[in-house]
Amino acid sequence: MIKGIFFDVDGTLRDFNEYGVRPSVYEAIEKARAAGVKCFVATGRHREEIREDYLLGDLKFDGYVYLNGCYCTDGDGNVVFTAPVHPSQAEKALELLEAEPFSLLAMEADRFYVNEASQAIIDMHKTLGSRTPRVNPDMTDCVKNEIYQLVIYGDMDVLDRVAAQLPLCAPTRWNEGGALDLVPVGVDKCTGVTAMMKYFGFAPEEVAAVGDSFNDMGMLKLAGLSVCMGSGRADVKAIADYVAPHIDDDGLLKAVEYILAKGLPDSR
């Protein structure tokens, strides 16, 4: 019996260029809740980014896996799990800024900032439907303070070189090129989902996951039921139990209806 559903954000709960979410997404979450199923977010996004840019409209969830599993809270904002980046990796990233042509975004628990408003950053965040992060004139903050995710922007050959020099970080992709998320080795969305499952007392077979991209594959493999959105990559579709229509065709609602039909007793 499915007790919880974990949803990716971009390409799943919302289209990349949407402001807020469409009515059928509200309907989907309401249907799940009416069936007694808890609903969770699992995203590479920062919580302030979601709030400030109104990415999820007025939707509220029972828990949140942010920053690819590195910062997790319950629905009231109480911290459930964290996995900070080792300070040496942030320090090395700052050194590499002097030698390599890339831009850097650092994410603390309550804020995030970039070293410059480069064209690569502006273009990437425009495709995501979010504003360009603020520039921090003192990037040493990311060495002095606890950081939960670094993001590097630029040409992929440069980003691969940079990532190779940060051995305590694992690069996570969510796009076709131009940016890499860097999180601690061994941490991904699946790590955060597992922590949330433990917190709420769920077994893997009691959860479902819905996503569309590289960084969703771990949680889709973990979940008892997995759904890939119609806009998803072929390799993500290949591991899913069900491929939903595109979000433009009420895909999220269809995904939830599939999960409820397959994952709840007939009496429900």
Image: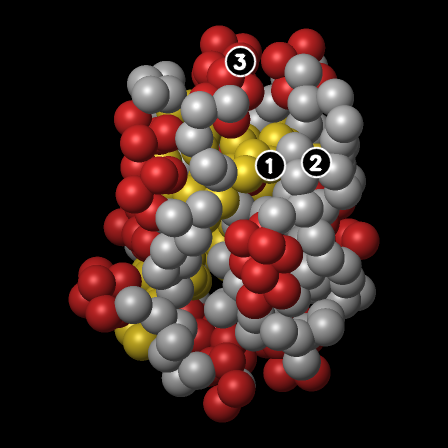
Which amino acid type is marked by label 1? Answer: Leu
37 or 66, which is in the foreground?
Answer: 66
In the rendered structure, are the residues bearing label 1 and label 2 in contact, judged by CB atoms less than 8 Å apart?
yes
Look at the numbered disc 3 and give the secondary structure of its residue.
helix
Q: Which mark is residue 91?
A: 3
Image-quadrant location for residue 111? top right
Residue 221 location (% of width, % of height): 27, 50
The quadrant the N terminus occupies is bottom left
**Where residue 208 sits: x, y (%)?**
41, 57
First along the sequence among labels 1 and 3: 3
Instruction: From the image, tell me which residue sits under label 2.
Output: 113
For label 2, the SS is strand
At a point 56% along the width and 35% down the height, the residue shown is: 104
Q: Is residue 62 left or right of residue 93?
A: right
Residue at x 51%, y 76% (from the top left corner): 252
Marks 1 and 3, Cα distance to the nearest angstrom?
13 Å
Vertical relation: 149 (above or below) 211? above
Which residue is label 1 attached to? 105
Hey, which quadrant is residue 238 in on the image?
A: bottom left
Given the image, on which type of amino acid does mark 3 rest?
Glu
CB-based contact (under 8 Å), mark 1 and mark 3: no
231 up-or-down from 33: above or below: below
Q: Could you tell which of marks 1 and 2 lies nearer the N-terminus?
A: 1
Q: Secondary structure at mark 1?
A: strand
Residue 212: image quadrant is bottom left
How dense is the environment of label 3, judged by Cα within 10 Å: few (below 14), some, or many (20 and up)?
some
143 sits to left or right of 255: right
Q: Nearer the viewer, residue 191 or 186?
A: 186
Residue contact at pointers 2 and 3, CB within 8 angstroms: no
